[in-house]
Image (spheres, rainbow, N blue to C red):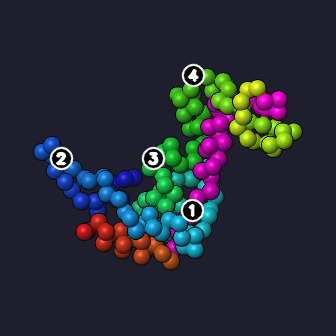
Amino acid sequence: MTTEYFSSFPQIVYNGDLITNLTIRLDFITKIKNNISIFQYIPVITGQKPEDIAYQYYGDATLYWIILYMNDIIDPYYGWLLTDNQLYAYAVQKYTSIFDTHHYETTAASPLGAGVITDSYNTYRTAVTNLQYEQTQNELKRNIKLLKGSYVAQVISEYRAELSQ
């Protein structure tokens, strides 16, 4: 997955070995990430990979890196929407018990409204388990920013220009 993206990164000598310089920051992408006029929001279907979306919208699966970069995803596995089985396995690995309380949230009857993180002494509270917390975090990954297709060639051109400096 990553070889295509990093193939344009410069090589440096580190401890006598020639390696890819992964510390490169693409400043132009950082500047355009907040320009909402060049994006659309799309839902990610469970099981869909960044490569699938890149192929569907850009006609080229190797452009998955644009999707990851625009959504600040560093880890393409855990930073992406997990399937139910993947999420369950992740939670089991991360927590001693997935059914222990992660935190408490206020209920609808609370003067604060529902879903506000609170302490265990609040009368209007409900426990959120570790698994429920991870499920909620995973659902936040369901909608992503997608660079509009008409800007892809420009982003690739600027990407190459910045890396060649």
Residue placed under numbered mark 3 in the picture: 75
Residue placed under numbered mark 1 in the picture: 145
The mark closer to the camera, 3 or 2, is: 2
Kindly give the residue lying farthest to the left in the view shown.
Answer: 16
| Mark 2 secondary-structure assignment | strand
Which quarter shows the C terminus? bottom left
Position of 25 relative to 104 (above/below):
below
Q: Quadrant of residue 9?
A: bottom left
Is residue 61 among what the camera can see?
Answer: no
Picture residue at 58% right of the left edge, 74% below the top: 37
Give the spatial CA distance, label 3 vs label 2: 24 Å
Q: Earlier in the sequence, mark 1 or mark 3?
A: 3
On whether residue 124 falls in the magenta region, the answer is yes
Q: Quadrant of residue 104?
A: top right
Residue placed under numbered mark 4 in the picture: 96
Categorize mark 2 by other alpha carbons within 10 Å: few (<14), some (14-19), many (20+): few
| Mark 3 secondary-structure assignment | loop
Picture residue at 54% right of the left edge, 34% below the top: 90
The type of residue carrying mark 4 is: Thr
The type of residue carrying mark 1 is: Lys
| Mark 4 secondary-structure assignment | loop
Q: Which residues are magenta?
A: 122-149
The type of residue carrying mark 2 is: Tyr
Give the spatial CA distance, label 1 vs label 2: 36 Å
